[in-house]
Amino acid sequence: MSTLAIHGGDPVRTRPFPEQRTLGDAERRAVLEVLDDGVLSDMIAERLEGGPRVRAAEEDYAARMGTRHGVATNSATTGLQAAVAAVGVQAGDEVICSPYTMSASAAVVLSQNGIPVFADIEDRTYGLDPASVTGRITEHSKAILVVHLFGHPAEMGPILDLAERHGLAVIEDAAQSIGATWEGRQTGTLGDVGVLSLNYHKIIHSGEGGMLLTDDDEIALRAKLVRNHGELTAGERGVSIPGTLGSNFRMTELEASIARAQLDRLEELLAHRRALAARLTARLAELSGVVPPQVREGCTSSFYVYGVRVLADQLDGVSRDLVADALEAEGIPLGRGYVAPIYRQPLYQQRAAYGRGCPWTCGPYRGEVSYEPGICPTAERLYEDELLILDVTRAPLTDRDVDDVADAFEKVLENRAALRAGRGA
Ligand SMILES: *Cc1c(COP(=O)(O)O)cnc(C)c1O
């Protein structure tokens, strides 16, 4: 057995993994066309629904995903903020959220003066656990904000049932899951409204950008009002609907042109991710003590990132962090635990999003939400003890790159006695 790099042996990998690169001639041509036109953004006067490329991008994405409407925004964060307002969340309403996601997935609720209530996740696909969601529903609940984490659909069947039974709206944060499907339907189109992210680090991108998807005419209208100062054409300029405080969440023509070209690459990029993920899973499934990502029956994943659970009790007590140290020494970049459960952030612990206790104690909120440690034990365990994140399915990585990752896992786990002893064998 070769000596672990952490003990002075040769690392499995010395070359760095390449950065994500997915732009080509189509994107270049699209941008040059906009520059030649000279109109970089076009949402004024009689055209408050956006310029030609923004509207075309909305049509393309809605058609590809299967909704009546697309509403382009300058990020998924602002798209989600518009979605929260558009489904009618008002000051003091509770929205049930995941604690194990990017901070924006809950912050957008606070932006509307709503109250994030964190339900736990399940540890197979890291989506909201329907049993925990059930326990969080109160008379103040207004919506459930579902995240399809790492590109795998959440358990939508029970969540949609719960929402229907309790009259709650369902908002999908599909920032990581573009192209992932649940029972043949696209994530982002399963609830009342969903939002895709087009930032550079996502599966396809326009630099920054978001796309809100909905079948509901009223939600689309309200989202467009929030996007643009509460103003729209159709003879009602300047007439905003109460509860939809407007801002500037507009996408430019440049981003829209790139977003359209990138959509043409989605199939190919997803196929690439799925092939590399399958290759890595085939290898890791042979090892005990690590759990590769599962794809539930009836679902496909976009493999935004590849999450692996490390189970110390199956590795003679070798911890996730020790495995991570050893893998990093072998030249494998990784993330530990993903993110701390969101409620641990000082903003929640001190209950001051806007200062002075707002929106928890300054407004109409009359509920009792808890942000105590331990409220979401599965999220805490994954963060503290189990999860490793690998960003190795993206283009331009190849089979050889994921083979190095698998070789490094094999080497580290085979040498776990030495790893535990803290020295070379
Ligand atoms: C990236 C991301 C967002 C925010 O997307 P932006 O387009 O960067 O605003 C929201 N939720 C999740 C789960 C994300 O991964």
Image: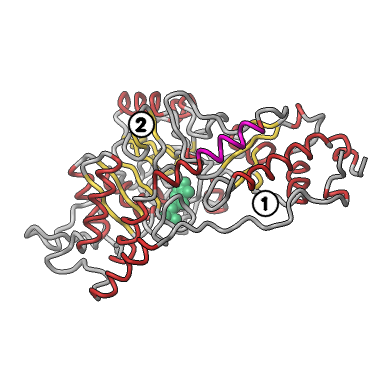
Height in image: 412 above or below 247? above
**Nearest the camera: 338 or 303?**
303
Q: Which residues are magenta?
A: 274-283
Q: Amino acid at mark 1?
A: Pro
Which residue is tagged 2? 139
Which residue is tagged 1? 333
Report, in whole angstroms, how far the alpha carbon at label 1 lies from the one at label 2: 45 Å
- Judged from the image, the secondary structure of the residue bearing numbered disc 2 is loop
Split into 4 quadrants, where in the image is the C terminus?
top right
First in residue order: circle 1 vs circle 2:
2
Height in image: 3 above or below 245? above
**Residue 176 forms part of the magenta stretch:** no
Q: Residues within 10 Å of mark 2 (few under 14, many from 20)?
A: few
Q: Amino acid at mark 2?
A: Glu
On screen, residue 27 versus residue 227, left or right, reads right
Q: Quadrant of residue 254?
A: bottom left
In percent of width and height, residue 39 lies at 24, 73
